Amino acid sequence: MFTVITFRTISLRLSAALLALHLVQMGRAEAQVVAKPVRVINYSAENFDRLCFRNMVATAAREKAQRMLNAKTALTESSVKLTPEQKSQLLLAGEIDIQRFFAAFEEMKSWWKFGSIPQDFFSEQFPKMRAAAMPLMERYQAGLHDEGSLFHKTKVMILAPADFQTMEDFAQQRKRKLYRNMVRATVAALDARLPLTMQQRESVITTVLENTTELDPHNYNEPMLFIVLPKFKEVEPQLKPLFSQDEWPVVQRFINLAGLRKR
Amino acid sequence: MRPLPVNSNYKPPAYQGKSRNMPKLATYLFIVTCVITSILSSTAFAQVNVARGRVAIPLERKLNELSQREVFFVNKICKPNQTQQQQISESASEKAKEMQKMYLEYSKNRAPATWPRPQAVMLEHLQDAVAATFSPAVSKAYNNEIAARKQANLTATASIVTNLIDSQVLLSHDEIDTLEAKISEFDTTKNATLPVAFLYQHMIPIPTAQNMESLLSNRQHTLWKTQKHPNYNQPWVNYFNSNDFLSSILPPGVGADVINRKLENRRDQPLVK
């Protein structure tokens, strides 16, 4: 069997060849799209530390915790007399708190992949990392030696009840003064925008202090104003009579700035 | 839309390809330029931008806001009659204009850090105006209120500086009071603008390193030195006690619309003669 080569068959074969060539080129183009290099994100363990400890690496954060432990012990010493044994027990308990915290942190860190990571993978991993780190971040910023810590439990154990009460009163007085300072500054911020009389100023400060519970000492993670304003919101009914009818909407607008607080 | 003729003798050619659109384009460009020029010139009257380095503020608006806020306070304390109210209001308004020229001059030859504080300048002027307009008893009451506000601002500033120091070295309640009293004596505290400092950590006026040494015990000072502190940086624009958050808080009757209306009325008056 043979094929008679005519002009028509040549033309058909040429068309088929051109089509094949076109398809091959398309295939190559597709292959090129597939072979396009994946974007890579370089995210190191240090980046993660800085995210968790407000731009500090874990070693620096640990050193800071150690310094705060010493400061806290010294503060306890200024309220009650500690024997050398009691002091070393307290320091040891505080050191264990720090070790426990950083062990938990390192364990959490080990769940994640660091280094050069494909962007897709990173985008999926990052929110999970952040969510998992959040409780630890908050714990660190609040201080590692407050209520619930071994340091605190040791204080309860080693101090006589009267001494413990003295120390608690001392801490409470400190907390109240720091809160008073924040309330004063909040009122001064309002004063700068809506000038207040002496009587208004003093009455606002007194009303807020007498009718709200103290805030914990501020950790400076966010503007102080936004932290204190919700306390003003709590006492709006008591504050309203201190202002004229015209002034009150301005005061409310000021208090509502609390809504700008980052969640 | 028909092209606008540039002059009455102009007659468009019957057909010249693309060049037929040229007169049309030139006319449009002319109109657009006129519009932009008029907008820019009116804006220049409405807002004088003092530019020095990165400082650029709508000065007239801020000064009007300041003068009206302080006039509101005079009204609140002195309870003026209509004539007195008008006198004070006009006096404050004139002072704001004068200050505008003053700051415009300063912007050419003095560093912002050396400029007098707008609020202090305005209050000084109003205290004189109140003394000239009201009885000595009313004037005294006004002066007492101003002094109390100044003191409250100073105490509040010293308070937030103390709280910041406490967050790094832990102070006892007695130390908090002692530190506050000492900090309120420092120039850094006296010159601070509180409301903005209260919003941004880097604007809290931390005392100088030398002053810190005198404030803290050895243990506390060692702890302080080993920690990171915010770098103090407060631009001149904050002397107006305003920022993006606080600019919406205005006394009653001192809305942005009132200030805008005043600016509109002044557009035809030259600012600098």
Image (spheres, coloured by chain):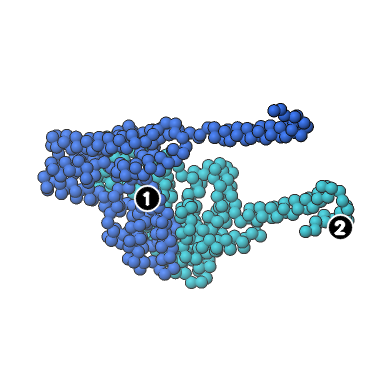
User: Relative to A11, does residue B40 appear above or below in the rendering?
Assistant: below
Report x, y in % for residue B197: 41, 48
Label 2: few (<14), some (14–19) or many (≥20) C-alpha neighbours in 10 Å = few
Q: Residue at x 41, y 66 (%)?
A: A248
Q: Which residue is drawn at 55% across and 61% down?
A: B259
User: Relative to B141, does residue B188 appear above or below in the rendering?
Assistant: above
Residue A224 numbered tag: 1
* Chain letter of the residue carrying label 1: A
* Chain letter of the residue carrying label 2: B
SS for dot 2: loop
Front-most of residues B229 and B45: B229
- For the residues labelled 2 and 1, the Cα–Cα distance comes to 68 Å
Q: Which residue is drawn at 40% across and 43% down?
A: A127
Number of on-image labels: 2
Q: Can residue A63 be seen in this view?
A: yes
* Colour chain B appears in: cyan
Specify the quadrant that holds the N terminus of chain B.
Answer: bottom right
Front-most of residues B232 and A159: A159
